[in-house]
Image (tube, rainbow, N blue to C red):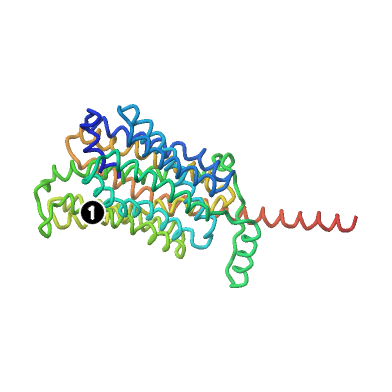
Amino acid sequence: MWALFTQPLSPALGASLAELQITFSVLIVVQTFLSPWQGVLVDRFGPRLLLSAGLSISGLSWILAAHATSLPMLYVTYGLLGGVGTGIVYVGVIGHMVQWFPDRRGLATGLAAAGYGVGALLTTFPISTVLRESTYNVALGRFGWMFALAGVLVAQGLRRPDSAWQMAWNQRRRGAGAATTLVKDVAPSQMLATPIFWLMFAMMTMMSTTGLMVTSQMGAFTRDFGMASALVFGLPVLPLALSIDRVTNGLTRPLFGWISDRLGRENTMLVAFGLEGCAMTMWLLTRHNPTLFVVLSGVVFFGWGEIFSLFPSTLTDTFGTKHATANYGCLYIAQGVGSVLGGPVAALLHEATGSWIPVFATIISMDFATAALAIGVLKPMRRRWLEQSQRDAVEMSAQEGEWAALRTNS
């Protein structure tokens, strides 16, 4: 949505495009780096209250931005407040999904993450229409009120699963002959002391950085590869590639999430991350072929977007559902680190070498390294962790039975 407002905001505030883009950078940084504390609040006060607050803040950020008369005001309203509100909503929704759908976490989080992008598609044309017929102030104010009111209304239907529901689900699973793994609920402070979390954090940071290296510099290397004026099916290469990328980046989230529910998280990571590495390699080798350039760009993003379904579901599988939202908030900082590193790292590498080949080589290396870490390191570490959690749960259950027998006898 932000891209629709940059053109009318620039003359109204007397600001350059670069100065305006700081607003969006503030939003992304606040959204990701405050996510652990936002997740703690969601876990403590429940999704209904916190998501209502987050949606209200998000709508308020647009309403106040409509009255901004300077860049600092825009940074505070659309950037700071918007980052706080959208951070609560995104982390809260993902945490909610992993709690309610324990046997379909990959698919559930993938659909939620895909919806995060589809929502923008649904409002693009209505906002564009208002901007053509009126001013950006009217558009920001009108849609800000709509987002806030509709969001708060929908949030009233949310509630987190209670222990009775969890016990009933476990019984149904056992009755269906499925092996139910007892996972210990781990608080964020304990999780941050485990090597598994930091391995996952490093992996998500690497994958986030590679995707954002491509996203931030795609226009530049398209031009340098001689594709700026090329046509595919009568359409310019860059807009066509970006359109396909949005579709594949959304499709991959529920698809690979669904696959991971059946084939296992790490096995799916190996396939997905390896696919991106192979596609990047082919993209580089065939960079002067316009048709392959467009097709392979879609495959690259198809191998990247699934990080938003695979990592939250893997994290909750490992550390339990009680603190799922706060735990994912800690991991989601990796996306913020990637957003800070992706563009600058790609630009610095290109400036230092005068070529995009080192940039592609870095991305390809990180893709294959993350795939190898998933299957060679994360999978055995998680297996040992879950086996220990199972033993701890059995021991705790036995101790509770002994205490209950002692109380009965006494």
Nearest the camera: 167 or 9? 9
Q: Give the residue furthest to the bottom.
A: 176
Q: Give the residue furthest to the right.
A: 410
Across and down, in percent, residue 78 comes to 36, 36
- Using the rendered view, name the quadrant where residue 253 is placed: bottom left
Mark 1, other Cα within 10 Å: few <14 / some 14–19 / many ≥20: few
- Using the rendered view, name the quadrant where residue 409 is placed: bottom right
Across and down, in percent, residue 62 comes to 36, 39
Nearest the camera: 7 or 131? 131
Using residue 348 as the reference point, say whether residue 255 is left or right of it: right
Using residue 88 as the reference point, say whether residue 393 is left or right of it: right
Q: Is residue 208 above or below residue 248?
A: above
Q: Is residue 298 above or below residue 11?
A: below
Give the residue displayed 49% in from the left and 51% down from the top: 155
Query: Which residue position holds label 1?
Result: 243
Nearest the camera: 189 or 392? 189
Q: How many marks?
A: 1
Across and down, in percent, residue 345 comes to 29, 35
Picture quarter with the N terminus: top left
Q: Is residue 156 above or below residue 346?
A: below
- The amino acid type of the residue labelled 1 equals Ser
